[in-house]
Amino acid sequence: MPVTSKYQDKNVEQILSDVVNVLEKHKASTDLSLMVVGNIATNLMNNNLPAAQRKVIAEKFAQALLSSIDTE
C-alpha cells in the first residue's frame, strides 16, 4: 500500500538534501550521521509531543524505518 504524505515531495527532498549537505560538510561517518539523526528524532519527540504519545510515535517511527530499509 503506498504511503501518502501531507507534505510535498519537493519540500521533503530539499530538506533532506540540506541535511545531507551538512553531514557531508562535516565529513560525518555513517555511524555519526545515524547518531545525529537519531538524536534529532529523540529531541523532536521529547520537545514537541505530549509524554503520553511519545512511546506510540517512537514505535511507529521505528516500524516505518524498518519497513523502509533494503534488506538485500
Image (cartoon, rainbow, N blue to C red):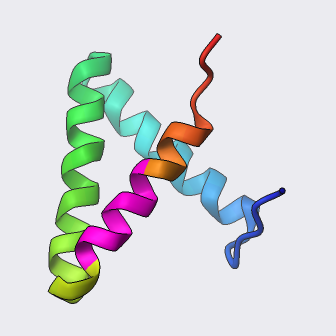
On the picture, is 48 further left or further right than 70? left
Quadrant of the image for the N terminus? bottom right
Q: Is residue 13 left or right of residue 64?
A: right
How many marks the image carries: the answer is 0
**Residue at (30, 44) in percent of width and height:** 37
Q: Is residue 61 shown in magenta?
A: yes
Q: What's drawn in magenta, residue-wise? A: 54-62
Q: From the viewer's perspective, is residue 25 above or below residue 17?
A: above
Location of the C terminus by quadrant is top right
Image x and y of residue 24, in percent: 37, 25
Q: Give coordinates of residue 45: x percent, y percent.
A: 25, 71
Q: Residue at x 43, y 57 (%)?
A: 61
Q: Is residue 2 left or right of residue 10?
A: right
Residue 44 seen from this side: yes
Q: Name the image quarter holding residue 36.
A: top left
* Vertical placement of residue 49 versus 68, above or below: below
Residue 27 seen in the current view: no
Please give the name of the residue rendered at 24% of the width and 55% of the height, measured from the top-left corner.
Answer: 40
- Residue 23: image location, x then y, percent: 33, 32
**Among the 4 quarters of the image, the one containing residue 67:** top right
* Left or right of 13 in this view: 30: left
Looking at the picture, how far across and down is residue 38, in whole percent?
A: 25, 45
Q: Is residue 31 magenta?
A: no
Q: Main secondary structure of the magenta part?
A: helix
Using the image, determine if residue 48 lies above or below residue 3: below
Q: Residue furthest top?
A: 72
